[in-house]
Amino acid sequence: MEKFTKVTGVAAPLMRQNVDTDLIIRIERLVGTDRSDLGPHCFEQLRLKADGTADPACVLNHAAYRDAPILLAAENFGCGSSREGAVWALMGAGVKAVIAPSYGDIFFNNCFQNGLLPVALPIAEVERLAEETRASPGNARVTVDLEEHVVVSPTGRRIAFEIEGRRRDALLQGLDDIALTLKHAETIAGWQNADRAQRPWVWL
Amino acid sequence: MPGKTLFDKIWDSHVVADLGGGVVLLHIDRHLLHDLSGSGALKEVEAKGYVPAQPQLAFATPDHAISTRAGRTDDTFPAGGPLLRGLRQRTSKYGIRLFDMGQDGNGIVHVVGPELGITLPGTTLICGDSHTCTHGGLGALAFGVGSSELVHALATQTLVQRKPKRLRVSFEGKLPKGVTPKDMILHVIGEIGAAAGTGHAVEYAGSAIRALPVEGRLTICNLSIEMGARTGMVAPDDTTFQYLAGRDFAPKGALWDRAVEHWRTLGSDADARFDREHTVDMARVVPQITWGTSPEHVVAVDGLIPDPARAPDENRRKAWEAALAYQGLEPGKPIAGTRVDWVFIGSCTNSRISDLRAAAEVARGRQRAAHVNAWVVPGSERVKREAEAEGLDKVFTAAGFEWREPGCSMCVASNGETVPRGQRSVSTSNRNFVGRQGPGARTHLASPAMAAAAAIRGAIADVRTL
């Protein structure tokens, strides 16, 4: 997993509710496309018109936001399908952190498996970040600092965010969950032996 | 100490180790693998140098990237062929049971799990698919995971998890005329929103749930993720046990009796506490239809298309406006009568035999509107064979509907089966997201009976007045 410590850059204000993972990456792209090649397809349904040309009305097509490493969004970002390709597509498009009031549970978990940081802030804070960004498109910089668990707004306001200690440490160190879990191999085997006696019908 | 909920009983009994900070190592009893997420996960397990820890607890069935056309082959949908062959090769290599295309036991992963008795009360079950919550209808703790967690679970038979909060949704009273389980759950999502269940495990309870057959409970649990909840469940009872008795992988003989004795202890205790409660008076529920691009964009079929000017807040006003523009709808008009081009009856939500019976009852002796393409895609080989034995296929084809092979098909449109751009579909599936049924496709979610009614009328129609 990629480490995450701190990112500073432009934040794209995609202030939309219920951005689902189908919208982030279309399912056809996950059939036969390598995960490292998903970036160009990220948000294609928002960015492209029916004829395949860029839609100038889409905020993600503005020159200021095209390569933004931070994404601002409204409630329930990443809801819907469990496809981890949504995280791979965002990261492939250069996004390092998302700031939104709330996230789909499965997407939220998937972020931490890959090194994308989902920051949860109240909607009023996200909207204020969006306003400060729009005031100076392309120049306004936002910092997301995981070590300090703080977001620094374009005007220098420091906004603390909460994150579970275990998740924070895993991101900072880029830890591999499987290797950590296998340290418990004996405990797992012990649980399974006891369960075989208690619930034999589960063990086919 | 207060009593425990159904969820807590299953969760607590599956904790292998407490990792601190509210995080546990949770044992996983069942993996379901499909061609899209399963093939990739097995490949990834291999690439990382691991092997599936307990292959006898994993089951595979292709459903996402296979064609549902009659006479299909492995490569009718060319991009799916390699996934299918990868699933065959790796399940064979590791001794994982595979229910291959066209074989008994094949079908949509969330239809065949319960149907084969792979899903059992009190078990933990995962799949790389968000609609894994479906299996909670049998009293399992079932949830969808992404690729990385799937790989973790295959390699270790456990997952690192945080305990969610508990939400109980109680449905009290009898189902009014024309109201189905799909309408019950869409009604709730409309009331409390697409994010109301985020961070929660949902238990569905109340007299209306107790009176529902298992297939209806599966439909309700299926849409838990559409209110944000990774898992939804119904306490196992005699209805559950009657459904499971004799199924392929359900216990038999003395072991069955022992299992049932255990399963009877799983229901929430009378004094169990929930973090949130929501109660629905069934007398107020009518047939539902979605109008927008989130399952929370839902109205009564005899209602009006909402006006963004009346949205409760600014972000929702913008969301409603964008949804209406995408869907090509005008606010303030009745939703019934909206012209429809496609009807899709299928998906892990509504493709079981009771769903097909309900749709066939509406279609029987009638004819689809000439401009409508109507597809019926049974959820599994068994559903298909049972429906054909009852003559339901003939009812559908006589009404001008197309009878197809099992698979996910047009619900997720990952197999090339899509609703054309700009066309409007009434679908029994679970998501009306932008582009879900194909780029530019406009989806309205409804029950099987309502979908059949739309095909007959050629427009969104109230099944109660057909």
Image: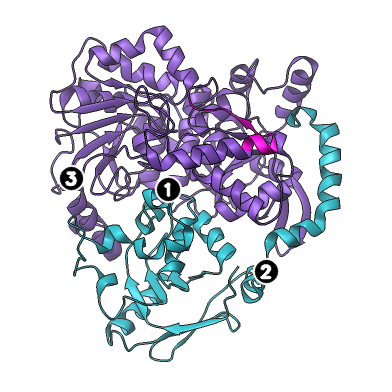
Rendered location of residue B278, percent (x, y): 48, 44
Tell me where residue B265 sits by quadrant.
top right
CA separation in Å, label 1 and label 2: 28 Å
Q: Nearer the viewer, residue B288 or A113?
A: A113
Q: Which residue is mark 2?
A: A175
Q: Position of residue B410 (x, y in %)?
A: 34, 36
**Colour of chain B in the rendered structure image:** purple
In the drawing, what numbered circle is on residue A31? 1
Q: CA distance from mark 1 to mark 3?
A: 24 Å
Q: In the rendered structure, the residue with mark 3 lies on which chain? A: B
Q: Which residue is at a point 30% across and 47% down the rendered structure image?
A: B297
Report the amino acid beneath label 1: Val
Q: Is residue A186 left or right of residue A63?
A: right
Magenta residues span: B91-101
| Chain letter behind tag 1 | A
Are discs 1 and 3 located on one and the same chain? no
Which mark, residue B422?
A: 3
Disc 2: CA contacts within 10 A as few (<14), some (14-19) or many (>=20): some
Q: Is residue B94 magenta?
A: yes
B19 left or right, relative to B274: right
Please give the name of the residue rendered at 18% of the width and 54% of the height, measured from the top-left corner.
B325
Q: Amino acid at mark 2?
A: Leu
